[in-house]
Amino acid sequence: MQIRLLMHLLVILVSISFMIRQIAGLASSIKFLICLPYLIINFMDIYFLIKALKNKPRFIDRRISSIYISSLVSIHPIFVILFSPGLTPVDILRQTGTLLNFLVGLFIIWALLSLKSNLTVLPEANSLVKTGPYKYIRHPLYFAYIILAIDEMMIYQTLPVSLLALLQFVLILIRAKREESILYDAIPEYKEYYEQTMWFNVPSDKNRLIRLKKIN
């Protein structure tokens, strides 16, 4: 369980650093409104990750590759900050991206309120959440992170940020696939849930359930 604790502490420290950075950069009421959803998200991440440490997962994916994937997905925003400029050459894209960023933040808050202490860093199986956005889509948080990756390309428009966004997209898809495999084997009712929900607004492929079972 030590690696699970370390992974949660990593994300908690990242969330705290972002909260400090966001608060320090609040120079106007408009910027405060834009950043407010993400201040709330960071606080919720910290709270739910601490609570999640009390869970006793049915299964945890401790593979080295899963640890690397989960770490990179979690600290992705840090790399974006390091490789992003202060301004963007196309203002309309920046404005659109800023609005999209705000709306996605509200969606993430909705997803976290549904997920609560089932929030994890490594792929693991606790209980099956079927409320809020999870009623319709299996991975609302991953979906939101992919939209944010697209949003980053719109706002910053640099090659390093674009490459980081594409990497994030690939890593999230891999992590989602591994998580589905774990949930399928650990939670009996996951098969029915899989058949009734969507991922990227594409109807579930029932034949994939057989392939998921073979992964583990």
Image (cartoon, grey):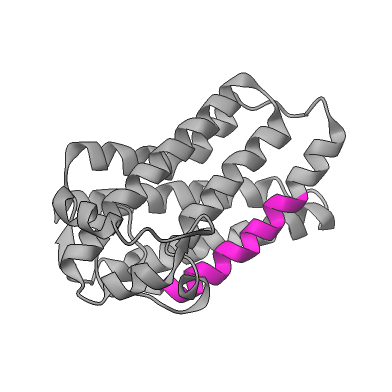
Residue 24 magenta-highlighted: no
Location of residue 104 with respect to 47 vertically, above or below:
above
Q: Quadrant of the N terminus?
A: bottom left
Name the outermost residue toward the right. 92
Picture quadrant where residue 84 is located: top right
> What range is drawn magenta here?
99-115
Front residue of 206 and 174: 206
The rendered magenta stretch, by its main secondary structure, is classed as helix
Q: Residue 80 location in percent, x, y?
A: 56, 32
104 relative to 1 in the view: left or right: right
Q: Residue 72 location in percent, x, y?
A: 38, 37
Q: Residue 197 location in percent, x, y?
A: 44, 69
145 relative to 170 in the view: left or right: right
The answer to whether residue 123 is seen in the rendering is no
Residue at image position (83%, 52%) is 28
Front residue of 84 and 96: 96
